[in-house]
Amino acid sequence: MRQVVPGVKIRDGESFESALRRFKRICEQEGVLSEIKKHQHFEKPSEKKKRRILAARRKVRRFGS
């Protein structure tokens, strides 16, 4: 499965810096960087399971009770 990288068209009179900020914000909302970080190294199934369990515990602690 291949994801498409979000694109940004520069508006009339818009500076490059503001377009870059908009692009970074869109990438953050889409989760592009976190997806890249996940695929930087191989994660064993046991490590993946452990990470998911810890995330679920944090979620319950934050929203539960």
Image (tube, rainbow, N blue to C red):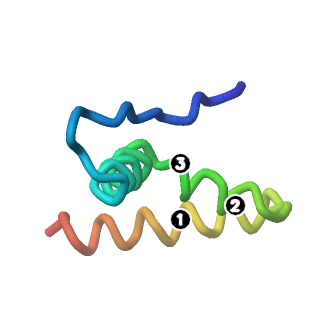
Using residue 33 as the reference point, say whether residue 42 is left or right of it. right
Q: Secondary structure at mark 1?
A: helix
> CA–CA distance between discs 1 and 3?
23 Å
Task: Return the residue at label 1.
Answer: 53
- Lower position in the chain sequence, tag 3 or tag 2: 3
- The amino acid pointed to by label 2 is Lys
Q: Would you say the residues marked 1 and 3 are in contact, meaning their CB atoms lie under 8 Å apart?
A: no
Q: Secondary structure at mark 3?
A: helix
> CA–CA distance between discs 3 and 2?
19 Å
Q: Would you say the residues marked 3 and 2 are in contact, meaning their CB atoms lie under 8 Å apart?
A: no
Q: Vertical placement of 48 versus 2: above or below?
A: below
At horizontal 40% and vertical 55% (from top left) the residue drawn is 24
Q: Which mark is residue 32?
A: 3
Using residue 22 as the reference point, say whether residue 54 is left or right of it. right
Q: Vertical placement of 6 versus 33: above or below?
A: above
Please state which of residues 48 and 60 is positioned toward the viewer in this rendering.
48
- The residue at the far left in this view is 65
Circle 2 packing at 10 Å, graded few (<14), some (14-19), many (20+), is: few
Using residue 25 as the reference point, say whether residue 30 is left or right of it. right
Circle 1 packing at 10 Å, graded few (<14), some (14-19), many (20+), is: few
Task: Return the residue at label 2.
Answer: 48
- Lower position in the chain sequence, tag 1 or tag 3: 3
